[in-house]
Image: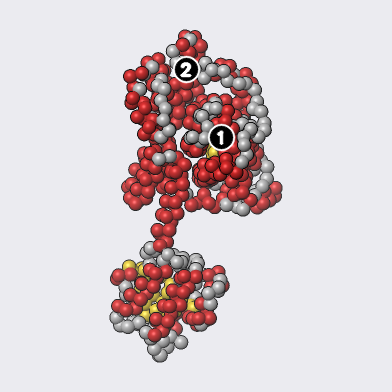
Amino acid sequence: MNKTEGLGRRSGFALLQGVLPIKGVQIPSEIVAGLTLAALAIPEVMGYTKISGTPVITGLYTMLIPTALFALFGSSRHLVVGADSATAAILAAGLVGLATTGSAEYVALSVVLALMSAAFLMLAWIIRLGFLADFLSRTVLVGFLTGVGIQVALGEISGMLGLQGGGHGTLQKIWNDLQQIEQVNYYALSLTLIVLAVIVGLKQVSKKIPGALIAVIGAVIASWAFELKEHVPVLGTIPSGLPSLGLPQVDWSWKLISKLVPTAFAMFVVILSQSAATSRAYAARYNERVSDNTDLLGLAMANLGAGLSGTFVVNGSPTKTQMVDSAGGRSQLSILVTTTVVLLVLWFLTGMLSYLPETVLSAVVFLIGIELIDVKGMHNIFQQRRPEFWVALITTLIVVFVGVEQGILLAIVLSLIDHTRHGYRPKNAVLVSTESGAWHLLPIDKAEQVLPGVLIYRFTHSMYYANSQQLFDEVTSLVKTAQPPLRCFVIDASAVDDIDYSAAETLRTLHGILKANGTRLAIVQVLDDVRADNHFGLVELFDEDVFYTSLEDVLKDYDHNTETQPK
């Protein structure tokens, strides 16, 4: 690592961390990967506008300024930032009832949400909150993305069948589709089946073949040649050229902002967690370093660029990142190639895209939704951690039947509950020594004394208010049932990295109970920083001689003392 790169990682800011250094031998692969991403992602991001409810051109805008800004400001060499189905679905759910889908007001509000997401990300970068990504567990993320996939796929059925559709929630949309089933447009249905067959069939041949792009180009040519606009809706006129820069024309009132804050925050959490998970995975694959906080800056700049260029929120995309990686891209240089291709499309090819039947985009988005449904991941969770499977399933059901925004907020809560559950009831143990001198763990209910009158109790978590009652109950129970009666009760604190006020008061109470019972308390292997953080006066309360460096020291002290208590 050169000095500039090292300084950038320490400060959390340096341009082109994801691009430099550039290896000459790698440039051809980067160009090919950039062209491949453009071929695959252009129809994909156009499809995402069906989810977000914004004009098709806004999908192309997400792959221009926002993508380039992350390449400049982010630290990950692999993460691709652009339109994403999860955040697009949150956007659509959050704007229900606030504006008519696709209207100028709706687009303006989606731009405001991008700017608000950028503000959350910028604040997170300033106060270095990159670690928050760790609090959204993989379990609920699998459940959340599966729910989004189901919701997205079911929402495109009306478009694939040429129905009018309608409704806000998944159930209402399905009900409307069933009521309109006799109105199926067979031209649309035929196009849908052909597009699905082309994309799925070519993927079976090779995942590197841009099946979606081939299907889109074929549909455009067929629509132009056979005048399909007479039979199925087409995209129509798409503006060409670069997006205009500026703030959206909205009433910047606190009333409006307060309505949008929950949606923007839900987007922020998804962006933070999904982007961090993706960038970490690819950094680990290539044994590279990545800075979550620097990526927060890159994501903030990308969403700022999205807002100022009139498009919707962008996110780190696992699918686009895999596209580049499979094509041989190993840096953000390939992403800059992609933005160049998108720029050429915006200048010269939007007229051709106007012939594209809308049902083709519905089919592309339907397959995107299907790919998000992680049946294998859900099955693995079910096999390995049954309680966590139910958490993932609940998250999925909430996303499908209640809403994406509610689903991600529930995912955060469930992740924190799952984390708290493990600390709330830690699996503590009793330590005994084997004939070889090694230490062996026993369950609490099978407690044995390491020496007559001496019991070693290991607490396996930080001591805090939620588990302090368990600490009290287990210690008093062990003392009460011990045979012979205990003369020394040893707490092995090697796994305790913090003691809060409630736990400290519990230890004070236990010290008094043990002392009244004629039992000496000893605390072994306390971490230096925990012992140094003496806010609660434990050292003064217990005396310095209560603390031992090792288990062997306390046993040696006990063996060499002829009194009832050590020392």
Residue placed farthest to the bottom in the image? 562
Amino acid carrying label 1: it is Ser
Residue depicted at 37% across the width and 74% down the height: 475
Residue 252 occupies which quadrant of the picture?
Answer: top right
Residue type indicated by callout 2: Pro
Q: CA distance from mark 1 to mark 2?
A: 24 Å
Count of picture labels: 2
Point out residue 165 in the picture as x, y percentages from the top left corner.
41, 25
Q: Residue sitting at 56 percent across and 36 percent down? A: 313
> In this orientation, does residue 67 appear?
no
- The residue tagged 2 is 233
In the foreground, 420 or 323: 420
Q: Secondary structure at mark 2?
A: loop
Q: Which residue is at the far top?
A: 226
Q: Residue at x 58, y 28 (%)?
A: 104
Q: Is residue 558 above or below residue 230?
A: below
**Residue 301 horizontal/vertical position (percent):** 63, 40
- First along the sequence among labels 1 and 2: 1
Foreground residue among 163 and 33: 163
Q: Secondary structure at mark 1?
A: helix
Q: Is residue 129 left or right of residue 245?
A: left
Pick whichever, 372 or 234, lies toward us: 234
Q: Residue 399: x and y, percent?
A: 41, 40
Q: Position of residue 167 (x, y in %)?
A: 41, 30
Q: Residues within 10 Å of mark 1 (few under 14, many from 20)?
A: many
Q: Which mark is residue 463?
A: none
| Disc 1 to disc 2: CB gap under 8 Å | no
Mark number for residue 110? 1
Residue at the image position 51 percent from the left and 11 percent from the top: 224
Q: Is residue 188 above or below residue 13?
A: above
In the image shown, does 180 or 144 lie closer to the viewer?
180
